[in-house]
Image: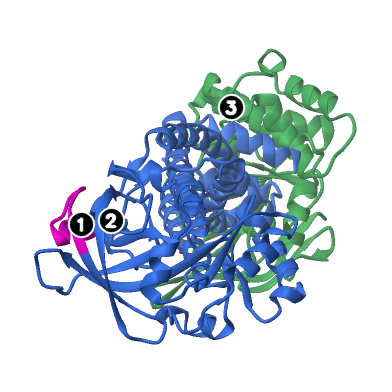
Chain colours: A blue, B green
């Protein structure tokens, strides 16, 4: 093994330009990987942080409501929501529990006919808006609702209705037994949540939504928040075992759509992106390694004649490839994590593409890459994978060179 | 007797045809010989050396080394035989360019599995070929004649049963060629090293103890010379 290492290292210095080129190829690959993986992690964390908060780390609903989740059936509600909130807040690990009502409404400016403009209307205590959603942070103008009859509109919905702060809209929702239920709301603020779909929402106080739904003292769900979204599973299990909550459906965020699949989806994207980069970089390594095998045919023949076995020959070239990858990997992840760190400060604007994302996944248009040790280690290991991918064929080729090649002489 | 070809044929496929490089050759080389394979280009000299050097296998017939039939050994077993028993000297020297003179010689010992006292053996071998002061030069920093001396040291350092050299002087001028050949003859006489060459060069033939002539893949003459 000692000879192989020595020869491999010496051979690296032989055609410095080519070695450098290969090192740079791997560096570029691992650098790109570091940035791409950081970016995907950033998107994932951002989505989780924002969205898990928005839908509740743990949600308590009527079991029938859980079954028809997508329809948001007001009829299957929590009539005594205060009791549910109290039970949840008594559970260690729970930071807060808020009653919440969601319903689909259509809306129009006061002086116009109710049209085709749909909005998702939220009713919740002001604390939910300020502490959980940080809605005050996302206000682009105006303020949060302070009393019934006031609403905050997402930018998209407001634009569709052509209203600004100070305007008045009529929304048409329904009561829990299905009768139409209109309300007159003064627009006191507009929010920009960073995504066209998400901006098609309306936020009112809980009492306003209870009035619309004819659901005095009740709500459709209780959203429970824990210190960290990672604690959700544990807290959900604890809540489920409480006798006071046994009649309800208790679910952690990652047990519910779309989050039960978003993690796997982003994981798949990571896999595909990594695969493509590893493959392309591997081709670069393959190219240069193959050249050096061809150039060294005679010399390999000489060593084979002197007793070097074909598996030792293969190992020698693999050591060369892995050494190149290790250098390239160090350079690549250093530069890559520098870039990722910089981008984690300034953000990357993804633009319109994000608006077309499935409605349930609230992506932000500006993402902030998240560079972590895990990512850097993964990118480095994938860099080594690139070398193996690119080195395996040349190494195999080298191992097929016959000892008689030594006798064929260059002229 | 060290090595022997018995009824050996060797053919190479060339498109749809088979080139008959050797057509039933019987030849044996004994210990202490200093033998040359001579013959026109394409007569099969290199092919015969390749087989005796265990670099290749015959199409039919048997190849013996120290009484063992090596024609049927596996690739790795054949490699081990070459590493321990056979020294090679090539026409274009074929040193490993990234290794120094002493490292090139040492490589032969390492591949032969020699563990102890390698450094002394390497230095002794290079001293014997007159390169005591060039131990740490790379091949590119040595002349052709010096490179071929390193190649001789590399072949001899492991005390092989036989040294096989395919046209060892073809890439050298006549002065260097003669010096190299005299050196090998000296090793042969002083240490009893067995040498087997191929050549076109009359100067080489003149120094050989035995000349085996090949033509169209057959042995046509086998002359033992009186000691010079
Ligand atoms: N690898 C090969 N593939 C096909 N034909 C080959 C191969 N090696 C040798 N031959 C053929 O076998 C015959 C003998 O070749 P060989 O190299 O043994 O001759 P040689 O006597 O060494 O000639 P030279 O003096 O030119 O070196 C030639 O006709 C040659 O073309
Ligand atoms: Mg020849």
- Residue situated in front as seen by the camera: A151 or A280: A151
Q: Chain of mark 1?
A: A
Question: For the residue carrying disc 3, how many other residues have a C-alpha within 10 Å: few (<14), some (14-19), or many (20+)?
Answer: many
Residue A317 point in image, percent of width and height: 59, 47
- Measure how far apart labels 3 and 2 are at the Cα level: 86 Å
Q: Is residue B86 visible?
A: yes
View extreme (top): residue: B133
Per the image, the residue denoted by label 1 is A158
On screen, residue A297 versus residue A346, left or right, reads right
Q: Chain of mark 2?
A: A
Q: Is mark 3 within 8 Å of ligand 2?
A: no
Q: Is residue B40 visible?
A: no
- Residue at 61%, 24% (x, y): give it: B179
- Residue at 35%, 66% (x, y): give it: A121
Question: For the residue carrying disc 1, how many other residues have a C-alpha within 10 Å: few (<14), some (14-19), or many (20+)?
Answer: many
On screen, residue A115 versus residue A196, left or right, reads left
**Which quadrant holds the N terminus of chain A?**
top right
**Callout 2–callout 1 Cβ contact below 8 Å:** yes
- Residue at 70%, 65% (x, y): give it: A87
Per the image, the residue denoted by label 3 is B147
Above or below: residue B108 compared with residue A241: above
Start and end of the magenta stretch? A157-169
Above or below: residue A187 compared with residue B89: below
Mark before the other along the chain sequence, 2 or 1: 2
Per the image, the residue denoted by label 2 is A153
**Callout 3–callout 2 Cβ contact below 8 Å:** no
> Are labels 1 and 3 on one chain?
no
């Amino acid at each position: 093994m000692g000879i192989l290492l020595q020869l491999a290292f010496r051979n690296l210095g032989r055609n410095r330009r080519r070695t450098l080129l290969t090192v740079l190829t791997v560096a570029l690959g691992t650098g790109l990987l570091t940035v791409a993986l950081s970016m995907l992690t950033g998107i994932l964390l951002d989505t989780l942080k924002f969205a898990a908060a928005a839908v509740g780390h743990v949600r308590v609903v009527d079991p029938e409501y859980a079954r028809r989740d997508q329809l948001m059936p007001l009829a299957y509600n929590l009539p005594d929501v205060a009791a549910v909130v109290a039970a949840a807040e008594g559970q260690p690990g729970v930071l807060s529990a808020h009653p919440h009502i969601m319903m689909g409404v259509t809306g129009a400016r006061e002086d116009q006919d109710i049209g085709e403009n749909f909005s998702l209307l939220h009713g919740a205590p002001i604390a939910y808006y300020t502490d959980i959603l940080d809605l005050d942070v996302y206000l682009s103008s105006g303020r949060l609702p302070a009393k019934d009859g006031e609403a905050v509109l997402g930018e998209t919905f407001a634009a569709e209705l052509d209203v600004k702060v100070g305007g008045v809209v009529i929304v048409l929702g329904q009561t829990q037994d299905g009768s139409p239920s209109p309300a007159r709301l003064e627009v006191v603020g507009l929010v920009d949540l960073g995504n066209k779909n998400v901006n098609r929402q309306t936020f009112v106080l809980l009492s306003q939504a209870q009035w619309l739904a004819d659901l005095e003292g009740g709500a459709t769900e209780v959203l429970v928040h824990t210190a960290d979204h990672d604690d959700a599973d544990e807290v959900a299990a604890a809540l489920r075992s409480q006798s006071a909550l046994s009649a309800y459906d208790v679910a952690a965020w990652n047990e519910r759509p779309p989050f039960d699949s978003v993690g796997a989806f982003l994981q798949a994207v990571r896999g595909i992106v990594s695969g493509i980069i590893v493959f392309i970089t591997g081709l670069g390594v393959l190219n240069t390694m193959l050249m050096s095998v061809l150039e060294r045919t005679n010399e390999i023949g000489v060593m084979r004649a002197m007793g070097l076995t074909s598996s030792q020959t293969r190992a020698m070239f693999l050591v060369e490839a892995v050494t190149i990858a290790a250098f390239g990997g160090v350079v690549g992840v250093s530069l890559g994590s520098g870039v990722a760190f910089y981008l984690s400060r300034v953000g990357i604007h993804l633009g319109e593409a994000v608006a077309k994302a499935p409605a349930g996944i609230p992506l932000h248009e500006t993402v902030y890459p998240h560079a972590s040790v895990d990512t850097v280690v993964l990118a480095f290991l994938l860099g080594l994978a690139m070398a193996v991918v690119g080195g395996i064929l040349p190494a195999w080729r080298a191992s097929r060179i016959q000892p008689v090649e030594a006798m064929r002489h260059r002229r | 007797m060290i090595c022997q070809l018995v009824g050996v044929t060797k053919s190479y496929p060339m498109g749809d045809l088979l080139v008959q490089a050797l057509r039933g050759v019987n030849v044996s080389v004994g210990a202490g010989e200093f033998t040359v394979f001579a013959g026109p280009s394409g007569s099969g000299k290199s092919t015969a050396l390749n087989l005796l050097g265990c670099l290749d296998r015959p199409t039919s017939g048997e190849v013996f080394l120290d009484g063992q039939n090596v024609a049927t050994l596996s690739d790795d077993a054949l490699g081990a035989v070459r590493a321990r028993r056979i020294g090679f000297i090539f026409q274009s020297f074929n040193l490993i360019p990234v290794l120094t003179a002493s490292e090139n010689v040492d490589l032969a010992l390492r591949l032969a599995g020699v563990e102890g006292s390698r450094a002394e053996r390497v230095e002794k071998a290079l001293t014997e070929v007159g390169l005591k002061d060039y131990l740490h030069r790379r091949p590119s920093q040595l002349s052709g004649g010096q490179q071929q001396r390193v190649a001789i040291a590399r072949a001899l350092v492991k005390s092989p049963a036989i040294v096989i050299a395919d046209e060892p002087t073809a890439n050298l001028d006549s002065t260097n060629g003669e010096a190299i050949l005299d050196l090998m003859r000296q090793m042969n006489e002083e240490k009893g090293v067995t040498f087997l060459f191929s050549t076109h060069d009359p100067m080489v033939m003149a120094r050989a103890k035995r000349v085996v002539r090949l033509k169209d893949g057959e042995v046509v003459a086998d002359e033992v010379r009186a000691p010079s």
